[in-house]
Image (cartoon, helix red, strand yellow):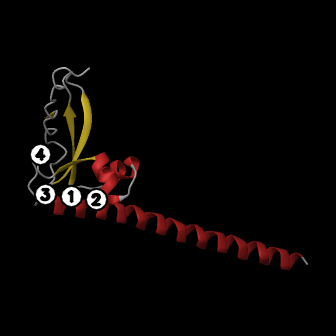
Amino acid sequence: MTDWISTVADLSSIVTAVVAVTFYVQHRRELRQQVRLLEDFLKADRLHIHNFNPGCRNAVFLMAQLGLTFDEIFQASLRSKNIIRIPVQGPSHRAEDIFFKYVDNPPGPEAPLPAPLPAAPVTPPPAGSK
């Protein structure tokens, strides 16, 4: 009876280890797919000409296009060597948004941070409106 219990315990520990390794590999693969998805989108996007900051996209736009959450986008940008984050300053000179941009040659650790971008011009409301 004791041999049977120890055999079952040994098998269950092996099965637990195999399941844990399988889920770990799957998790790492999903993280890499998120990075690749973000890199591919930003790489293709920089070829298009936009009115404001070509090749830069904010998190809300990326969330709508890629179906990822803000946290997933930000974590993927931190894991990627080719995606830089650029703060956007508001009128009070505080960061109001973050743009993500793909670069072929990422800056090294000694490189200065990218300059903050000015906020988009704010159009005043039409006269007579409250």
Instruction: Using the numbered discs, state the Cα–Cα distance from disc 4 to disc 2 in whole angstroms.
Output: 18 Å
Q: CA distance from mark 4 to mark 1?
A: 13 Å
* Disc 1: which residue: 42
Above or below, comparing residue 103 to residue 118 in the picture: below
Mark 2 or mark 3, earlier in chain: 2
Q: Residues within 10 Å of mark 3 (few under 14, many from 20)?
A: some
Q: Residue at x 60, y 71 (%)?
A: 19
Q: Amino acid at mark 1?
A: Leu
Q: Quadrant of the C terminus?
A: top left
Instruction: Give how far apart the Cα atoms at labels 3 and 1 are.
Output: 6 Å
CA gap between label 2 and label 3 equals 12 Å
Which residue is identified by label 2? Answer: 38
Q: Is residue 104 left or right of residue 4?
A: left
Instruction: Indicate which disc, 4 or 2, sits on the residue closer to the N terminus.
Output: 2
Q: Nearer the viewer, residue 128 or 47?
A: 128
Q: Pointers 1 and 2 in contact (CB under 8 A)?
A: yes
**Residue at label 3?**
46
Q: In the image, what residue type sits under mark 2? A: Leu
